[in-house]
Image: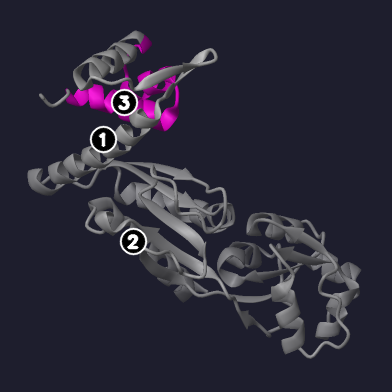
Amino acid sequence: MRIPSTQALRALDSFARHGTVWRAAEELHLTRSAVSHQLRLLERDLGFELLERVGKGVELTPRGRHYANDVRKALTVLGDATVRYTGKGIGGTFTVSCTPGFASLWLCTYIDDFQRQYPDVSLRVVTPRRLDDVSNPEVDMFIAFGDGNWPNRAVDLLCELHFTPLCSPALMNRMGGLSKPVDLLRGTLLHLGDTEDWSRWLALSKVENPNPDAGIVFSDMNLVMSAAIAGQGIALGDELTGRKALVDGRLVRPFEQAIKAPRSYFLVHEHGKTDHPVVTAFYGWIKAQLAEAERRA
């Protein structure tokens, strides 16, 4: 059996990622009819159906999805080989999955520096369904929030976190100041996911008869910090994602006590992508940025 054309394989890969012919055509700078033609030729060469009609649209068949996943891996290998052996600079499409909170509170503040250093990299940033989700096959690197347990993946600790109360200066003034930890109970506690972290901090600070279950629970740190900045309550945040708001004066840290977070941010990727040039470049860049931000703090 002859190997299908690279153009047809790229058409399949683009359709699999975007889910529509018109988006694939837009990415490949082709007409919709040209993409459809490439997919039909590919089906003919393979001898099985890649697409099936569903309602008014078309989707990949189960067999087509599996084949498209293998094609994407093969195209990645070819792209890496081109970069490695032609001596050209680092380039290509690179997709990062990042938790919404880390993306908006930290990554979006510095990401243009990566683009300036690696202008030939076409960078895409997406957000996961869960903070610890590393299942998206289209992603090259994950910035995940969890306990570090992702079997069969390469996992590197990005940074350890320590949580401490953070609130807006306006809220602290409305509360008449916060001179001792027990004063926090006069305000609204803002939680990430559950109330465990506030329970630990209040216990560490020897606050008697606390009611840590009171307050508002959010699913993402971005929402917690946004509510805190808006004066809606007191967050238990970390100085990494909260640093810009602290420097700008939108948040203040009323107490020195901090607890080590049970979860942290990790860089996660497939073992097969360890030597991927852009993975190596992104890893070095983000580590350097974090170290520089820590030095400036």
x then y, percent, for residue 200:
71, 81
Badge 2 amino acid: Tyr
Kindly tell me whether residue 45 is visible in this rendering. yes
Q: Which residue is mark 1?
A: 71
Secondary structure of the residue carrying tag 1 is: helix
Q: Which mark is residue 12?
A: 3
Tags 2 and 3 touching, CB below 8 Å: no
Pointer 2 or 1: first along the chain: 1
Q: Is residue 166 left or right of residue 265?
A: right
Q: How is the image coloured?
A: one colour
Q: Residue at x 71, y 74 (%)?
A: 196
Name the residue at the top extreme.
Answer: 33
Magenta range: 5-32
Above or below, 283 against 32 in this view is: below
Question: Which is nearer the eye, 168 or 275?
Answer: 275
Above or below, 53 against 126 in this view is: above
Question: Does the magenta-highlighted stretch encompass residue 60?
Answer: no
